[in-house]
Image (cartoon, grey):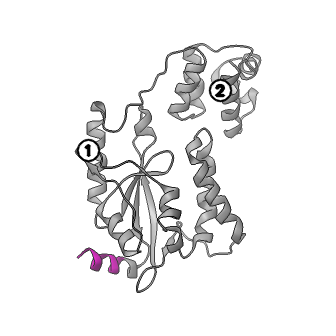
Amino acid sequence: MTQVGELLREARHRRRLSQLELSHQLGISARHLGFVEVGRSRPGRALLVRWLAHLEVPLAVRNQALTAAGYAPLYDDAPLDGVHLREATAALGALLASHDPLPALLLDADWNVVAGNSGLTRLLGFLGVSAPVPDLRDGAPSTPPLPMVDLLLEHGLAATIANLEEVAPPLLAQVRAEAVGVPGLEPLLAVLEEVAGTGGAIDVPAAPTLVTRYRAPGGELAFFSMFTTFGAPLHITLASLRVELLFPADAATRERLALSAG
């Protein structure tokens, strides 16, 4: 039971809750909570499920905790091309396509590119980046996911980012927050730590959102992002996915994209 206790303790620390605060919120004694965290007691299944949900533990990690405690896992982890996910996969494909000619990409919990639209492929080509971007065909990704680290380094996308030292620190903070319980993020975390550590703090004007600027023929292209996720997903695969929609951050970028799409 130590593994479950350690997981619950780490999750509580991330939420910045004391044992007393959390015990009150869960309606249990602080003594019982403490015994569970050190592995001296096992919570009932219903309590463990409620405990994990209250701390917003990722669904995959909730399954791991339930299994470690001797209970059956609760959440399905079938792949994206599974029969039960056909409608969800179709919705993802429609969202990616509807954003064209602007770039859009589907990311998983490890920040792998599961799929992209024509706008993303067109943008990468415009930047001189040759990468095998998967797309959604017949309810499934056409090729294996493309790791973000490979896209940045092996395929050269990072070299095209004009303000990499500016965007790396906030991205690093985001990845660090997501990396707890997600070992697949370690390579990306290492890359961002190296980049963010070289430039130090950068004094830039406050902006409504983070803008990434890419070096391209004829001048820079600037984008900001919006993310879309499933509402209250109860499936591990769906919970791990998000769609990143890129939008022009200035009129020049918007005009150049319209010309290249035509």
Name the mark on residue 90: 1
Task: Give the mark nearer the N terminus: 2 vs 1.
Answer: 2
Is 252 placed above or below 97 here? below
Image side of residue 80 versus residue 209, left or right: left
- Which x, y percent locates residue 2? 71, 21
- At x 51% / y 32%, what residue is drawn? 60
Identify the image quadrant of residue 204: bottom right
Is 236 placed above or below 249 here? above
Front one among 110 and 236: 110
Q: Secondary structure at mark 1?
A: helix
- At x 52% / y 26%, what residue is drawn? 63
Q: Quadrant of the N terminus?
A: top right
Q: Which residue is mark 2?
A: 25
Whether residue 17 is in magenta: the answer is no
- At x 54% / y 16%, what residue is drawn? 46
Q: Secondary structure at mark 2?
A: helix
